[in-house]
Amino acid sequence: MSRRVIDAVLLEFDGVLADTARARREALLSVLGEEGFRLTPEEYRESCAGLATPDAIRGALRRRAVLVDDTDLELLTLRVDRVFSAHVGKGIVLVDGARETVERLAARVRLGIVSRSPRRDVEFVLSLAQLEHAFACVIGVEDAFPGKPDAAPYHAALRRLERRRPVPPEGVVVAIEDSIVGIQAAHAAGLRCIVVGDVPAHLAMEAEAIVPAITGLDVATIEALVAREGERFA
């Protein structure tokens, strides 16, 4: 029986730690609406949820068979991010139990954020919550290309962790995500993944485990959720 240890937990910011999913969706739909495009909730979930702003715009317009050049994409992205940042400026609320969970996990393992949000927005909210000290690294959308579902964002986080202290051979790194593209990115990077929130069950099954929220998660619970047959955590 192999003995393993949780070395680090990497979390998406939007929807896992902060209640930003609605603001991000409304920002995108507002700008697209101004351009004459409408998406149903199902269309948004299938083509945009979990993606960085440029990829979400491409996904939305692709559903309408509309191609967008780089200049127009950049302008649309700036508009969406401006609307979203206005929401952030009004105050973003951490999800219930997020502070306690972060502090509990940070006392035992290394933590990092791998987010589809701009790093400045993530760091701003963390500073307001006085939680910036808890994270060994923060990877924003500008820090890795391509974005999720590609493994690049998680590879960037792993490199940051390695520079501080290498992951030991028995170490396990776990991602906590809220979308199918996040699950795919984590798995592409060789990580195990727990998904939170209202991801449709047939999609969430790709993760190692599904939980309603991060409230109450501790290292022992994470170990139990991601353990594979024949493994024992120290």
Image (cartoon, rainbow, N blue to C red):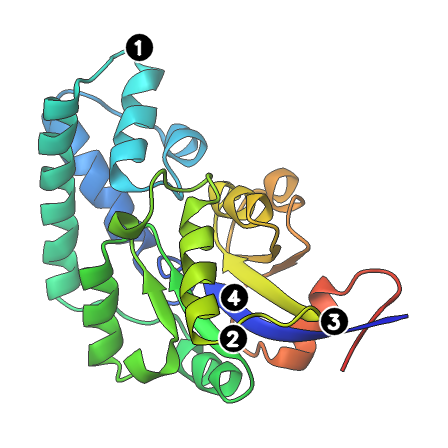
Image x and y of residue 88, in percent: 17, 61
For label 1, the residue is: 65
Alpha-carbon span between mark 1 and mark 3: 45 Å
Image x and y of residue 151, in percent: 48, 44
**Dot label at residue 213:** 4
The disc, 4 or 3, on the residue closer to the chain's N-terminal end is 4
For label 2, the residue is: 215
Residue type at the position of mark 4: Ala
Quarter containing the C terminus: bottom right
Question: Residue drawn 13% across and 55% down?
Answer: 85
The disc, 1 or 4, on the residue closer to the chain's N-terminal end is 1
For label 3, the residue is: 224
Counting other residues with Cα less than 10 Å from the Cα at mark 4, is it few (<14), some (14-19), or many (20 or more)?
many
Alpha-carbon span between mark 4 and mark 2: 5 Å
* Pointers 1 and 4 in contact (C-beta within 8 Å): no
Left or right of 77, for residue 108: right
Q: Secondary structure at mark 2?
A: loop
Question: Residue drawn 17% across and 51% down?
Answer: 84
Alpha-carbon span between mark 1 and mark 4: 36 Å
* Pointers 4 and 2 in contact (C-beta within 8 Å): yes
Q: Secondary structure at mark 1?
A: loop
Residue type at the position of mark 3: Ala
Q: Quadrant of residue 74?
A: top left
Left or right of 88, for residue 212: right
> Can residue 39 be seen from the camera position used here?
no
Residue type at the position of mark 1: Ala
Left or right of 12, for residue 207: right
Q: Secondary structure at mark 4?
A: loop
Question: Residue drawn 54% across and 80% down?
Answer: 109
Question: Residue drawn 36% across and 69% down?
Answer: 137
